[in-house]
Image (spheres, rainbow, N blue to C red):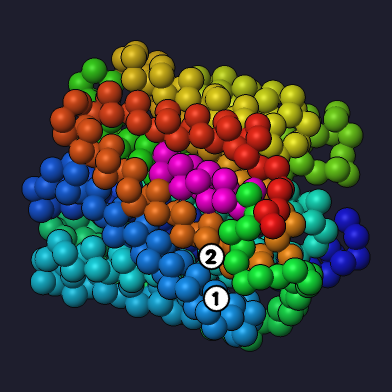
């Protein structure tokens, strides 16, 4: 590691905390969907409006940002990455606080408004934090840094279903009941976002200056890799969110497992936990400071440790009451190790190259979806749960490949990529409508289309070609 990257270690650690926070709150939506579905007696389509409101905010916020940056100049360039992050945290805190009156008035539309506000705050965080992490060091190691930060993002998404499911479905539900169960959790989250903003306010972060581009024209859309990358982010986020949103309901099907929502939320931790394993392992695979032997050892060691951690997180309440259940849970989750091994082998085959890894992982996810749709029981369950392992590196690889060579257009390009998170709003509700019409299990055919596009981006679409 160079001295320059060593100097960036502390600010990178601070930013990684943000990745954890928004990962936690994003995955919490997967618990809200079945919870609000039951509380308000909604159809699957109506329940997936949770994701439509949340991720729709990314689109609206990014459109506004793009218009401003195209006509008035880039806001982040004017106010700085640090101030952009702080503003995003304050807006996100407001969105969380709105859950209290939403529960008080018991209006589903109010919940959607709170989620929209929360999404607007996270939009600004995404626009500012992702390129900032990419700029904190050498360009060639940017995918590795983003994978590392995204690994902690996945730690948040892993904890969230298990902890949030326990608090909402069991602990607070027993104490308060009804939609009031969400009040304490979201008030705590609002306070946490404000505290993070206060910490960042008083932490010294380096002022990053993007390289100048003499041919800067005010529009990042002249870069083909960015244009194709926008589509890649749309389909990646759409597929990942749609699968996570309907997983608890999928596991509740009689032909799969037939479990209740509380039990399904525990298994959901494996889906998001798989992404954490893949991101940490992917960060190691993309490192250029290790021999192949050391990489294999480090990747295997990290993956096994995280497997044990995820198994504990998924059922932490029962295990704390009866520690003997931990060994039973490890045995029950052993099939997951097979998919972890496949993930590591593919990472090594791709030699840490972002485009090749993306192609192989997208192909794997598509194959697992086919298994999930056309089989039943444990095979279908493990196939769908294991997709998280292969979603793992997609965001960081797509993002860094998409902004490669953008120079002064980087922040604007970042806003366009964040705009494409709209996929997380649209694809889940489309799959929800399909589930209501053709059946929940067959609706999982839809994300296959998303992964086919990602295969294209990993093969050809990523190549940095600038149009005149």
Left or right: where 296 falls relative to 47:
right
Magenta part of the chain: 225-240
User: In the rendered structure, does residue 239 fall within the stretch colored magenta?
Assistant: yes
Left or right: where 287 falls relative to 115:
right
- Magenta span: predominant SS is helix
Q: Nearer the viewer, mark 2 or mark 1?
A: 1
Q: Residue at x 86, y 43 (%)?
A: 288
Q: Which residue is mark 2?
A: 415
Depth order, front residue of 261/167: 261
Depth order, front residue of 180/346: 346
Left or right: where 47 falls relative to 51:
left
228 vs 178: above or below: above
Whole-Å distance between the Cαs marked 2 and 1? 9 Å
Disc 1 crowd rating (10 Å Cα; few below 14, some 14-19, many 20+) is many
Q: Earlier in the sequence, mark 2 or mark 1?
A: 1
Q: Which residue is mark 1?
A: 69
Q: Is residue 374 visible?
A: yes
The quadrant in which residue 304 appears is top right
Picture quarter with the C terminus: bottom right
Find out whether the residues at labels 2 and 1 contact each other: C-beta distance under 8 Å.
yes
Disc 2 crowd rating (10 Å Cα; few below 14, some 14-19, many 20+) is many
Q: Residue at x 62, y 30 (%)?
A: 359
x, y percent for residue 349: 74, 24
User: In the rendered structure, does residue 250 fall within the stretch colored magenta?
Assistant: no
Q: Secondary structure at mark 2?
A: helix
């Amino acid at each position: 590691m160079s001295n320059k990257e060593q100097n960036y270690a502390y600010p990178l650690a601070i930013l990684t905390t943000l990745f954890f926070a928004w990962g936690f709150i994003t995955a919490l939506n997967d618990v809200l969907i079945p919870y609000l579905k039951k509380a308000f007696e909604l159809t699957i389509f109506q329940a997936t409006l949770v994701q439509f409101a949340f991720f729709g905010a990314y689109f609206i916020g990014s459109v506004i940002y793009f218009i401003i940056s195209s006509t008035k100049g880039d806001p982040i360039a004017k106010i700085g990455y640090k101030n952009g992050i702080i503003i995003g945290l304050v807006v996100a805190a407001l969105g969380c606080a709105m859950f209290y009156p939403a529960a008080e008035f018991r209006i589903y539309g109010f919940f959607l408004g709170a989620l929209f506000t929360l999404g607007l705050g996270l939009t600004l965080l995404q626009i500012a934090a992702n390129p900032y992490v990419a700029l904190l060091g050498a360009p060639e190691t940017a995918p590795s840094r983003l994978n590392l930060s995204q690994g902690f993002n996945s730690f948040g998404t892993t904890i969230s279903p298990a902890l949030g499911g326990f608090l909402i479905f069991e602990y607070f539900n027993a104490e308060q009941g009804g939609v009031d169960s969400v009040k304490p959790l979201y008030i705590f989250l609002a306070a946490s976002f404000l505290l993070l903003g206060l910490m960042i306010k008083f932490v010294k972060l380096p002022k990053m200056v993007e390289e100048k581009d003499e041919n800067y024209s005010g529009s990042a859309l002249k870069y083909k890799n960015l244009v194709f990358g926008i589509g890649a982010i749309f389909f990646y986020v759409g597929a990942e969110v749609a699968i996570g949103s309907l997983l608890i309901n999928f596991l509740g099907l009689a032909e799969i497992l037939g479990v209740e929502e509380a039990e399904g939320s525990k298994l959901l931790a494996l889906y998001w936990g798989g992404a954490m394993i893949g991101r940490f392992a992917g960060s190691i695979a993309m490192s250029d400071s290790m021999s192949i032997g050391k990489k294999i050892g480090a990747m295997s060691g990290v993956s096994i440790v995280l497997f044990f951690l995820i198994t504990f997180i998924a059922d932490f309440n029962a295990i704390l009451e009866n520690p003997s259940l931990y060994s039973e849970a490890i045995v029950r989750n052993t099939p997951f190790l097979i998919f972890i091994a496949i993930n590591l082998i593919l990472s090594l085959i791709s030699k840490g190259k972002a485009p090749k890894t993306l192609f192989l992982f997208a192909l794997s996810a598509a194959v697992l979806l086919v298994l999930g749709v056309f089989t039943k029981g444990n095979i279908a369950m493990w196939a769908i749960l294991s997709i998280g392992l292969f979603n793992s590196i997609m965001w960081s690889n797509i993002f860094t490949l998409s902004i490669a060579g953008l120079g002064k257009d980087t922040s604007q390009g970042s806003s366009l990529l964040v705009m494409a998170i709209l996929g997380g709003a649209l694809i889940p509700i489309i799959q929800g409508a399909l589930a209501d019409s053709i059946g929940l299990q067959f609706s999982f055919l839809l994300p296959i289309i998303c992964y086919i596009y990602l295969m294209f981006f990993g093969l050809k679409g990523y190549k940095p070609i600038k149009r005149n």
